[in-house]
Image (cartoon, rainbow, N blue to C red):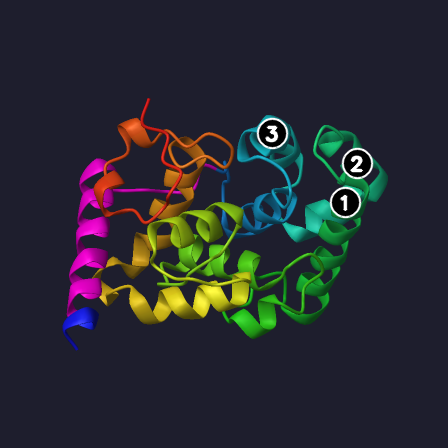
Amino acid sequence: MLVDNMKKAKIDQIFERLAADNPNPVTELVFTNEYTLLVAIVLSAQATDAGVNKATPALFAVADTPQKMLALGEAKLKNYIKTIGLFNAKAANVIGLSHILVNDFNGTIPHTREELQTLPGVGRKTANVWLNCALGQATMAVDTHVFRVANRLGLCHTKTPDATELALVKAIPAKWMLHAHHWLILHGRYTCKARKPECYRCVVVDLCEFKDKNLA
């Protein structure tokens, strides 16, 4: 029980510091409504938010609803997103999910994870990101940054994204959950980098379990 209490106190400290460093974290994807947010998240798979943001303003200016996206068509969509990795497959997914939204959901985005995951290109992580950013649900979306940071910090010791999600939902106090995945993502993107973490400027370095700290 003492160990559990110590771990809870440590986790609380970690998020207190991350929150103080970035009180209101938000997605870095550019979007204009619930639909364009979903499209941006789908396009961001195995790509950077910055790369997606370079392509989407022009796209969303002409196609910010599923109906307009279908009118644009897959071939023209590809021209807008051709700078994004895997753009052929992503174009097919965006057109496919737009068809389903129009035909099965009256052009609106469903508000459950299960329904979201019926859409092409929308897995559990994508659904969790959308539910968090669009609806303010306290979900835990595990990408490579969250997986890396959570395990380095010792918030969990897991081998897969799904196991990481379950462990973090269990470990992180409810008061931090709304923004928790954004704090971890942004910390991984800008400080706790994969190849050369910038531990020398990390706000939680003394609480971190990572053994190969870069303190120079």
Residue 26 forms part of the magenta stretch: yes
Instruction: Tell me the SS state at disc 3.
Output: helix
Magenta stretch: helix, strand or loop mostly: helix
Front: mark 2 or 3:
3
Q: Quadrant of residue 201?
A: top left
Name the kind of residue labelled 1 in the image. Answer: Ala
Residue drawn 70% across the image and 33% down it? 84
Residue drawn 17% across the image and 49% down it? 16
Where in the figure is residue 191, as x and y percent of width and height?
Answer: 37, 32
Report the residue marked by disc 3. Answer: 51
Name the kind of residue labelled 3 in the image. Answer: Gly
Report the residue marked by disc 1. Answer: 91
Direction from residue 3 to residue 82 in the image, left or right? right
Can see residue 23? no
Q: In which quarter of the image is residue 1?
A: bottom left
Residue drawn 68% across the image and 71% down it? 104
Q: Give the range drawn in magenta.
A: 5-28
Tell which circle, 2 or 1, labels the residue nearer the N-terminal end.
2
Q: Which of 196 and 106 is in front in this view?
A: 196
Front: mark 1 or 3:
3
Image quarter in which the C terminus is found? top left
In three-dimensional space, the C-alpha distance between marks 2 and 1, rounded to whole angstroms, equals 6 Å
Q: Residue furthest right?
A: 75
Q: Residues within 10 Å of mark 2 (few under 14, many from 20)?
A: some
Name the kind of residue labelled 2 in the image. Answer: Lys
Where in the figure is residue 137, as x and y percent of width and height?
Answer: 37, 63
Residue 135 forms part of the magenta stretch: no
In three-dimensional space, the C-alpha distance between marks 2 and 3, rounded to whole angstroms, equals 15 Å
Q: Which of 150 and 172 is in front in this view?
A: 150
Report the residue marked by disc 2. Answer: 78
Relative to 72, say whether 169 is above or below. below
